[in-house]
Amino acid sequence: MNRWSKAFIAASVGMAASAAFVVSSPSGSAESSLVAKYLCTGGVAGTNGVQLEATITPKIAAGGTLDVGWALKYQGTRRFGSPGFFPAGSTLNLEGVVDITGAWDGQLRPKGSKDQGELVLGDQLKLPEGLSAGVIVKNPGTIRVRPGALTVRFTPAKGEVMVNNHKAVISYTPDWNRISTEEEFGDHLYDLHKTNQKDGIAKLSFVGTQVSYISRRERDLSEIRVLLDGDTVTDGLVEPGLDRDGTPMTGTKAKEVLWESPELPYGPHTIEVINTESKVAYVDAFKVSTGDLNEPPTHNQATCTLQNDPGAIDVTVPGATPTSPTPTSSPTVTTPTPTGPTGTPTPDPTTPTPTLPHNNPPGTNDGLVSVIPGSVRTSTSTATPKPTTTKTTYVKAQVAKTPKGGVDSGEAPEPPGGGSYGLIAGGSMLLMGSATGGLLLRRRKAEHAGGVES
């Protein structure tokens, strides 16, 4: 091979080497969601149950965080109901379960809460706008997300509520009648329930930690027996005809606390007011109190079970070729492959294949979360992974110099310091020199030919 051919090959190799350094940046696709349908029973859902629909959307956020969001809405006509009378500030808390397998095994528990206004027994409760949970994923790979159970808890606000005598939650024996009162007396909402029948009963069922019987003090009123959860607290009777100091009343005092219960465990209770004589007895209101609760009470808790198979979503965490978990139906995962100058994949032998951890011990946070196999949807991460660089490997000559007449397999590489830039520059200069020499040679031949003819 002559030196002009070598120069041309050197220049071509230099251009190919320059083109080989390409950065590959995979792009994400649109988010995918699952729809899960639940039937919730017990607690604030009641015995007939409440239907919910949850739309679950997992995604990889910036920084490698897996976010799982739930959007919730009621289905059908039934709603969660207030279990009692509470001031503003009660909360409805929902907690879901997301089972995850793949680059890390475990569970996420998305949570959400919604503050409620002042409530009376049976008021509809408002749902949280959604639930959310996130965890940082350190290892690349494929994570399978599948929704699980859902739990509903109600935390009542601390405070007290007046339950007026006309409320339907108070039951009366037929001898009781509602009467309006003059504003000057100051009765609660200016009305009372009244009876003069012995053994006439007024009964309230409530949820809370304390209750008080509110009514008038007035001369010649009947003595009252109060039962709490079906039993007397003490043997004494309430005497509305006497003042607090035990002297007979000479006028009327409204909204008096005639009886108050001890502190009670939070939950359902009853109070009964019983007329013990054939004289006048009144009920103005009951005051229901709720103490400070550190945890949502189990009494109000509803359990929600899946009514359909929502399937699962595979989320690809960028950074390496993902290793898919073992599914019932295999998902499709597309990963961009770096290519060499000719467009064919070019492996880098110096880069080891990453091994994704599985079944991490509890308490670790190396990735994510386990599931029941089912139908699978595939979603690619929307985060932009770190760019990967494609390398091209060349075979170097095995002899110091090609012998004359031997196979031209190339010469040994230059010693350190020469580099490819010298080769490219030398080849380019040789090409230029060759072209110039060719032109000069043709010109001389032309001149020589012209001299012979003359």
Image: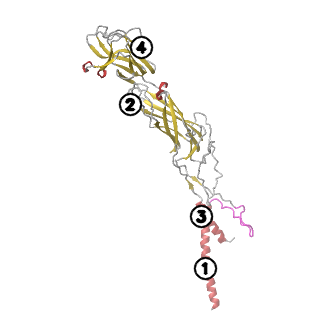
Q: Residues within 10 Å of mark 4 (few under 14, many from 20)?
A: some
Residue found 44% across the figure and 14% down from its top? 230
| Residue linked to disc 1 | 440
Q: CA separation, marks 3 and 2?
A: 73 Å
> Residue most toward the front?
174
Q: CA distance from mark 2 to mark 4?
A: 31 Å
Q: Is residue 404 left or right of residue 344?
A: right
Residue 98 or 321: which is nearer the viewer?
98
Local packing at callout 2 (Cα closer than 10 Å; few below 14, some 14-19, many 20+) is some
Q: Which residue is mark 3?
A: 15
Q: Pick the residue in front: 67 or 427.
A: 67
**Residue type indicated by callout 1:** Leu
| Mark with earlier residue (2, 4) | 2
Is residue 454 left or right of 156 when viewed as pictured?
right
Image quadrant assignment for residue 97: top right
Within the magenta stretch, is there residue 406?
yes
- Which residue, given by chain and number where applicable, does mark 4 sit on? 227
Q: Is residue 5 above or below residue 87?
A: below
